[in-house]
Image (tube, rainbow, N blue to C red):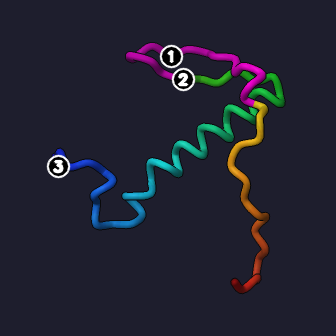
Amino acid sequence: MNDAPIESARDADLRLSLPALQRAARRARELAARTGTALVISRGGVTELVTPPAEALRPGVQERPAGYGDKE
């Protein structure tokens, strides 16, 4: 196993995987808060159901909608 930080990986997909996972987690918390759904998480090998706080409804990452076939 390599002990180097993931941010120093040569592969861009690997380097950017942590921010992508953080965005996905933020969106999951926002969706769970909007729908009143509990999140299933694992802490120290113990599975827990967590209800996200209302603060999770604050706007998170702003992205423009994907336009299929659009050229940038």
Q: Which residue is mark 3?
A: 2
Q: Secondary structure at mark 2?
A: strand
Which numbered disc, 3 or 2, marks the residue closer to the eye?
3
**Left or right relative to 7: residue 59:** right
Q: Residue at x 79, y 64 (%)?
A: 65
Q: Are marks 2 and 1 in contact (CB under 8 Å)?
A: yes
Q: Position of residue 61 (x, y in %)?
A: 68, 49
State how far apart marks 1 and 3 are (Cα): 28 Å
Q: CA distance from mark 2 to mark 1?
A: 6 Å
Q: Which of marks 3 and 1 precedes in the sequence?
A: 3
* Residue 69 against residue 45 in the figure, above or below: below
Q: How many neighbours does mark 1 have within 10 angstroms: few (below 14), some (14-19), or many (20 or more)?
A: few
Number of labels in the image equals 3
Residue at 55% x, 14% y is: 48
> Is tag 2's residue or tag 1's residue first in the polypeptide sequence?
2
Residue lying farthest to the bottom in this orientation: 71
Q: Where residue 26 appears, x then y in whole percent?
A: 63, 38
> What residue is pinned by disc 2?
41
Q: Is residue 12 left or right of residue 65?
A: left
Residue matched to label 1: 47
Residue 59 picture location, percent across and down: 77, 41
Quarter containing the C terminus: bottom right
Binning the other alpha carbons within 10 Å of mark 2 as few (below 14), some (14 to 19) or many (20 upward) gives: few
Q: At 54% from the left edge and 23% from the top edge, which residue is drawn?
A: 41
Residue, x 62% and y 15% (percent of image)? 49
Q: Secondary structure at mark 3?
A: loop
**Amino acid on which disc 1 is placed:** Thr
Q: Amino acid at mark 2?
A: Ile
Which span of residues is magenta-colored? 41-56
The mark that comes first in sequence, 3 or 2, is 3
Name the residue nearer the viewer: 36 or 71: 71
Q: Looking at the picture, does residue 5 appear above or below residue 72? A: above
